[in-house]
Image: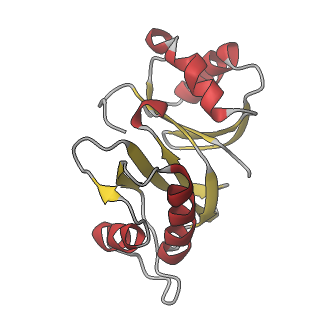
Amino acid sequence: MLFNLIVTHEPGPDNPRFIYNTLREKISDLVLVDSGPAVMLFKTKDPYGAIKILKKHRSQLTMIYRIIPVDLTTEAYVEDVAEKASELALERIPPNRTYKIVLHGRLYWRGTRAPAHSMDAISVIAEKINRKVSLTKPDYLVYIRSLRLYRIRRVAAITVTTPDNIISLVSGKP
């Protein structure tokens, strides 16, 4: 996998450098893979361990909106994301627990390459996950973020985790 940690931040010309230096002070094996407007992609040995470390330093994480660990990446097609997300969700979410799908960014239909409406994409993904949905107090999140890698290739990052493993500093929502 090319990256396993997503950091979203305030836009600004000097912010990526400041954020990179701040995060490197806390996580020594952090490697910057790519960055774009208000998003940085990192690789680390243990993304969930990095989240635990960074939670202890919340007050020093200025200019950062969210820090999301990534379990896997795939092409940004609804069909591919639905297959991979369901495999991961059924493996990680116990049958008696609830989940919620959070989708940031645009997914596409494989056959037509046309953009999929967010609600349509979420419906297709949710159909494959045989667990109870809770939109208000989920036990787990199926977090999907579509983004450009190296400004060329669009990929979807998928995370299935409990809400406390996503650091959300501004909105409080994952």
Q: Position of residue 143 (x, y in %)?
A: 45, 50
Q: Is residue 47 left or right of residue 108?
A: right
- Find the residue positioned furthest to the front: 96
Q: Position of residue 78 (x, y in %)?
A: 47, 73
The residue drawn where x is 40% and y is 45% is 140
What residue is drawn where x is 56% and y is 73%? Answer: 80
Where does the image place residue 73, in percent across and percent down from the top left? 63, 58
Q: 28 or 128, which lies in front?
A: 128
Classify residue 86 as left or right of residue 117.
right
Q: Quadrant of the C terminus?
A: top left
Q: Is residue 53 above or below residue 131?
A: above
Residue nearest the viewer, comparing 171 with 141: 141
**Looking at this view, is 122 or 43 the one in front?**
122
Q: Is residue 82 left or right of residue 35?
A: left
Give the quadrant of residue 50: top right
* Colour scheme: secondary structure
How many labels were placed on the picture?
A: 0
Quarter of image, res 126: bottom left
